[in-house]
Amino acid sequence: MTKIIDGKKRSEEILADIKEKIDINKLKPCLAIILSAVDEASKIYVNNKITAAKKVGIETRLISLSNNVTAEEILKELDKLNKDSFVNGIIIQLPLPSHIDSSKIIDAVDSKKDVDGFSPYNVGRLAAGIEGFFVPCTPLGVLDLIKQEDTNISGKNIVIIGRSNIVGKPLAQLLLKQDATVTICHSKTHNLKFHTLNADIVICAAGKEKYFDKSYFNDNSFVIDVGISREESGAICGDVDFDSINGFIKATTKVPGGVGPMTVASLMKNTLKAYFIQNEY
Ligand code: GUN
């Protein structure tokens, strides 16, 4: 039997906890989302974020920009949001249109409102192993799910497949802070199976539809699937071929219903934290 770690259920627990804190203390957190109309998947992710925010009592402000928006126009919107004392958290849904230098935009987000944890201050603090304001949402969600199954990861071999700034790199730093032994693999890694077959935990964040079958794992593997792809049929699937690994490995998350809802729940957690930081609780 392969144990399924249920991210949907865990995210609902986290959201219920956030809602209770907001209701009891009559808080009014507000999250601003900048979305450029470039990417269909981004629109779905942003809708999920707005729905979750509504559920817990976080107000949202959606700033929708067109595909041909300029960097100067985004920076102007950002400046307003940075200065607006009613806005606690700001995210820029990525990717931005290809003519825009994303790093220039991300660098301009006030680090105390940077609930994605992508600004230089927050990235640097995490890399240095020092507490910053915010840690990126998907890594936070993955760590929570790992702890549902394995409460002591000190010394364990954890392999991350994928080296993005959103998942792979910050997740490695978060896990190092927990004393795990972390290996980051990527598209140029030689003999990937050598790494995955010897790992206690494998985190697949490669963005490769159903790529990892049971030959990558052993019967004691614990797998976290961060991938989200859309099959030709329209169904959502992850990086892992679930039918192949189910019944063989020890534990796994599923797609949908695994990491995705945890990313959203972590964003709500960070937004509430931003409210507390700005209101100096
Ligand atoms: N695009 C894909 N994942 C994310 C995320 O976690 N935050 C933002 N802002 N954009 C994304």
Image: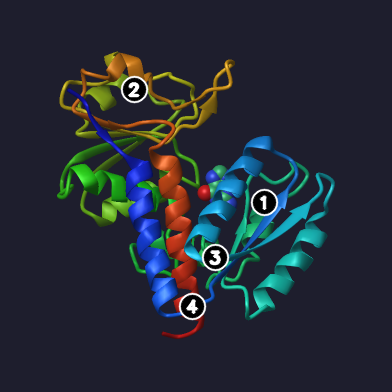
**Residue 102, disc:** 1
How far apart in space, not on screen, are marks 1 and 2 (Cα)?
A: 30 Å
Element type at marker 1? helix
- The first of marks 1 and 2 along the sequence is 1
Which of these two is toward me, 99 or 141?
Answer: 141
Which is closer to the viewer, label 4 or label 3? 4
In primary-sequence order, the first of circles 2 and 3 is 3
Q: Determine whether label 1 and label 2 are within 8 Å by CB.
A: no
Name the foreground residue: 82 vs 104: 82
Q: Mark 3 points at which residue?
A: 114
Residue at numbered disc 2: 192
Contact check, label 1 and label 3, Cβ < 8 Å: no
Please indicate whether residue 260 sits to the left or right of residue 194 in the image.
Answer: right
Residue 95 position (above or below residue 61): above
Does residue 83 appear anywhere in the picture? yes
Q: Which residue is drawn at 37% across and 60% down?
A: 16
Which residue is identified by label 4? Answer: 27
Q: What residue type is labelled 1?
A: Ser
Task: Look at the numbered discs 4 and 3 and tell me whether their residues touch, using CB distance below 8 Å.
Answer: no
Q: How far apart are marks 2 and 3 (CA)?
A: 34 Å
Q: In this view, does 195 lie above or below 93?
A: above
